[in-house]
Image (cartoon, rainbow, N blue to C red):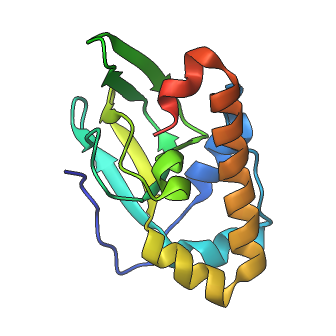
Amino acid sequence: MNAVTPSSTKLDLQGLINAIAQSDADDSLNNPLKPEQWDILTAYLQPCTLAAGQLLFNQGASDRTLYMVESGSLSVHYEDEKGRLRMAIVAPGTVVGEGAFFSHRPRSATVQAAAPSKLWALTALRFTELSNRQPALALSLAMAAGAVLSKRLGNRRRRVAST
């Protein structure tokens, strides 16, 4: 489904950090980390690139990976019980997948790239490892992702973006 790009070199998160700093979206991720914390976090993230139209995940999938959006845009959509399609666009500087990440429930919507996109994936397993080794860093990141979830749930039109 998603295209995780393995890398043997030190990853550079500067593009993601810049996207977060420059985002003016209501549901943007506030930069919760200091530069040295971003350096530590690189060991727990995997880069993920998507071509336009490529699926990141489907509604109902049981994956709990949290994705931070560096570039591009993602289309989030689902069909409700009455067959109506609802959609939101997720821009750089925020996260996607936070709903399942926190709830341990299946994905609530389908997410695909609306444009070529670069994301950073944090799996539930790697987050657990981060929590054990760097609890303050994990807490800061979880609180920032939780704030995005809260903003989306508080905005009726943005709720569909909580995946």
Which residue is at the front of the view, 147 or 112? 147
Taking the spot 56% from the left edge, 56% from the top edge, the residue there is: 102
Decide if residue 10 is in sight here. no
Taking the spot 67% from the left edge, 20% from the top edge, the residue there is: 155
Taking the spot 39% from the left edge, 28% from the top edge, the residue there is: 76
In the rendered image, the quadrant that contains the C terminus is top left
Q: Position of residue 31 (x, y in %)?
A: 76, 51
Q: Residue furthest front?
A: 81
- In the image, residue 95 sits, relative to residue 143, either above or below, namely above
Task: Examine the image and state in which quarter residue 130 appears.
Answer: bottom right
Q: Position of residue 116 (x, y in %)?
A: 32, 34
Decide if residue 71 is in sight here. yes
Which residue is at the front of the view, 81 or 144? 81
Taking the spot 22% from the left edge, 29% from the top edge, the residue there is: 53
- In the image, residue 121 sits, relative to residue 119, either above or below, namely below
Number of numbered discs visible in the structure rendering:
0
- In the image, residue 134 sits, relative to residue 118, either above or below, namely below
Task: Examine the image and state in which quarter residue 63 appears.
Answer: bottom left
- Residue 20 lies left or right of residue 42; in this view the side is right
- Residue 148 lies left or right of residue 158; in this view the side is right
Q: Residue furthest bottom?
A: 133
Q: Position of residue 27 (x, y in %)?
A: 67, 31
Which residue is at the front of the view, 110 or 52? 110
Q: Position of residue 45 (x, y in %)?
A: 48, 69
